[in-house]
């Protein structure tokens, strides 16, 4: 019966079968706008988070480089101080200072007192 009505009106049965029918969106429906704004905000937050992590990594790299330079300088200073310490504690230097500046001499056999 439906076929006879379609034939009387001059329509064929397969008119819309091969076509893509698009539904028009209601202009008052704001759901699309909310989703678009939310997606944009999320994308901007992700970009800022990525940039923040990159800046943090670069700054940490600079901190590590400064710490390594400071460590190398401290190691070099430690070497210089050890050499100076060894020079200052040498027996030849101590004996020279004792004899020239303090006017000390080696004790004679009579000056040595044995304690039991």
Image (cartoon, rainbow, N blue to C red):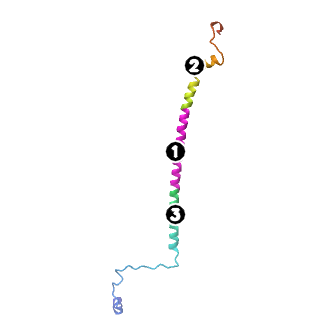
Q: Is residue 110 above or below residue 62?
A: above
Q: Position of residue 41 (x, y in %)?
A: 53, 65
Rounded to the nearest angstrom, the CA distance separating label 2 from label 3 is 74 Å
Query: Which callout, 1 or 2, points to the residue nearer the camera?
Result: 2
- Please name the residue shown 53% across and 34% down the image: 76
Residue farthest to the bottom, as pictured = 8
- Please name the residue shown 55% across and 36% down the image: 74
Q: Which mark is residue 44?
A: 3
Q: Which mark is residue 91?
A: none
Where is mark 1, residue-wise?
65
Look at the image and tell me in which quarter the C terminus lies.
top right
- Please name the residue shown 53% across and 48% down the image: 60
Describe residue 53's horizontal placement relative to residue 101 as left or right: left
Q: Position of residue 102 (x, y in %)?
A: 66, 18
Q: Earlier in the sequence, mark 2 or mark 3?
A: 3
Residue farthest to the top, as pictured = 110
Q: Earlier in the sequence, mark 1 or mark 2?
A: 1
- Magenta range is 52-78
Where is mark 2, residue-wise?
92
Disc 3 packing (10 Å; few <14; some 14–19; many ≥20): few
Residue 55 visible to the viewer: yes
Secondary structure of the residue carrying numbered label 1:
helix
Determine the image quadrant of residue 90: top right
Residue 116 visible to the viewer: no
């Amino acid at each position: 019966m439906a076929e006879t009505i379609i034939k009387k009106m001059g329509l064929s049965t397969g008119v819309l079968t091969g076509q893509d029918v698009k539904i028009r969106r209601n202009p008052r429906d704001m759901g699309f706008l909310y989703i678009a704004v939310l997606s944009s905000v999320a994308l901007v937050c992700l970009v800022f988070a990525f940039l923040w992590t990159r800046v943090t990594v670069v700054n940490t790299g600079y901190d590590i480089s400064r710490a390594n330079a400071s460590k190398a300088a401290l190691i070099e200073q430690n070497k210089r101080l050890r050499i100076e310490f060894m020079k200052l504690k040498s027996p030849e230097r101590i004996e020279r200072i004792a004899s020239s500046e303090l006017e000390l001499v080696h004790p004679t056999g009579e000056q040595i007192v044995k304690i039991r």
